[in-house]
Structures are given as C-alpha cells and as structure tokens.
C-alpha cells in the first residue's frame, strides 16, 4: 500500500533524485535578480526536468495555476536588514502546508552560532508534525555562525548534515565540500537523501555543471540551485543541462551542450 508520505515524496523527487529551485529569497533579500516574478521562472523550467521548487507561502497563493512539479513551502525567515540575519524564525505549520496544497516543508537551520539552539528546536518540532501528517521535510543544514571558520570543512559539513537526519529530516540539503572523496564519506553517513546547495552565482556555467557531476559521483541525490538557475539568462536551458547530469548520467561537458540550444 502506498502511503501519503510516499505519494508526496514522489512529487518532490523523480526516481529518487531531485532537481529543485529554491526561490525563498524574497524575505531575506527582496526581489533579487531573476525573482521579480517567480511564476515566470517556474513556467520556463517546469517542463525541462525540474522536479520541485521551494517557495514561501504567499507565493504559493499567488501562483496563477497548479503545477506538475512538487512544491515545498519554506517556513524559515530572517532578513538582511535584521540585527541577527542568521536567526531564522518559524513562519508556519504543517497543517497550513497541507491547506496550501504543498507536498513538503522546508526549513533553514544555521549551525555554529548563538542562534543555533532555537533553530534546532524548530527542526525537532516541525519534524514531529511532518511525521504526524506524513509530509516530507527538507532541512537546509548550513555551517554558519561565530564558531564556523571554514563552512566547507568536510568535518563540519558532515556534522551539520548529520544533525538534519538525526532530527528527522527526510531530505538534507547542505554545502558541497569541494571534492568527491570527502563528500562521499559524508553522504554514506547520512541515512536520508543528500542534495547540495548552489551558493552564490557562479562565474561560469561549467563551474556549476562540474560541481553537479562531482556531487552526483559522490552519492548526492540531486541539487537545489537558486541563483545559478533563476538568475541565469536562460534558466530553462540550465535546468535541461542539470537534468542531463542528474537523470541521464551525462558528464558536465556533455550537459553544457544544452545551454545555448533553443
């Protein structure tokens, strides 16, 4: 018998893999380049290999039509104008997510700073609610705070990612360490799918695609890239290229041929 949890996971992932655009930046940074109208990005990309998106609750309500891809509603918020921008506050409930028609919930957890305890408590609370309602939970687990000198340190990334799984996340999003060997050890120690963040806008498409290929070789189950997709001059082509690597095991060089094609 198929469970409600599995039905929702199958909307978020495809054959166990993820190609997701997080578009929750409007609260933290305002209408950043490429996200002036999130619906435009979704419309361009949803038929080219995208499996899911991460958006805030107000954007879900503003969508002009229902989508064929998975929706994770993001329930963490802080702003760049704040005295404590790393302090993410809870902005909704799992019951609300179900009322909105979302397939899953996303939380952002910063580990390594003075705000850490509050966010860990939020993760535990929402994890319990998600389990109750059979709703998948994605935890964005970031090494970020006063005690983190190098956020890409494999030991730190591994610890932070493991926290997400330990507290009940069904998908863990974290930073790529920069090499296949160290990241593969992290993935092996996480009992749920691990996907990587894209970080700031990359200098070249090749950099994004090569990082994706390496992460997949290390055992990642996909990517959640924001600016490297929605701020791209052809986001649908970047999605096509990423889909080639994630779902068809193409190399970065092979996938890059998709960019520039019409």
Image: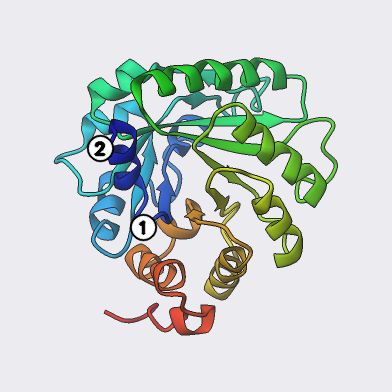
Task: Of the two numbered discs 2 and 1 on the same chain, state the one appearing first in sequence.
Answer: 2
Which picture quadrant has residue 55?
top left
User: 181 above or below 224?
Assistant: below
Other residues around mark 1 within 10 Å, as few (<14) / some (14–19) / many (≥20): few
Residue at 46% x, 75% y is 249
- Determine whether, in the image, residue 103 is placed left or right of residue 146: left
* Res 37 seen here: no
Nearer to me, 66 or 247: 247
Of residues 132 and 148, which is closer to you in this image? 132
Report the quarter where the N terminus lies.
top left
Which numbered tag is attached to residue 1? 2
Camera-near label (2 vs 1) is 2
Going by the image, does 74 lie left or right of 67? Answer: right
Residue 145: x %, y % from top left: 76, 31
Figure quadrant of residue 46? bottom left
Residue pushed farthest front?
1
């Amino acid at each position: 018998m198929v469970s409600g949890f599995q039905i929702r996971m199958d909307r978020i992932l495809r054959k166990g893999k993820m190609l997701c655009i997080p578009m929750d930046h409007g609260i933290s940074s305002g209408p950043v380049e490429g996200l002036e109208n999130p619906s435009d990005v979704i419309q361009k990309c949803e038929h080219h290999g995208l499996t899911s998106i991460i958006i805030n609750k107000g954007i879900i309500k503003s969508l002009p039509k229902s989508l064929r891809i998975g929706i994770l509603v993001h329930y963490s918020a802080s702003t760049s104008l704040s005295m404590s921008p790393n302090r993410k506050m809870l902005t909704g409930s799992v019951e609300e997510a179900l009322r909105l028609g979302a397939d899953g919930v996303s939380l952002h957890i910063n580990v390594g700073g003075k705000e850490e305890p509050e966010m860990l408590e939020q993760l535990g609370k929402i994890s319990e609610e998600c389990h109750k309602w059979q709703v998948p939970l994605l935890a964005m687990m970031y090494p970020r705070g006063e005690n983190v000198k190098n956020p890409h340190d494999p030991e730190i990334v591994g610890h932070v990612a493991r926290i997400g799984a330990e507290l009940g996340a069904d998908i863990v999003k974290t930073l790529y360490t920069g090499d296949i060997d160290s990241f593969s050890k992290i993935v092996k120690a996480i009992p749920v799918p691990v996907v990587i963040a894209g970080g700031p806008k990359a200098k070249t498409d090749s950099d994004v695609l090569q990082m994706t290929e390496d992460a997949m070789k290390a055992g990642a189950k996909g990517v959640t890239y924001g600016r490297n997709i929605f701020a791209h001059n052809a986001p649908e082509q970047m999605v096509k290229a990423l889909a080639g690597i994630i779902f068809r095991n193409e190399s970065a060089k092979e996938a890059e041929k998709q960019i520039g094609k019409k």
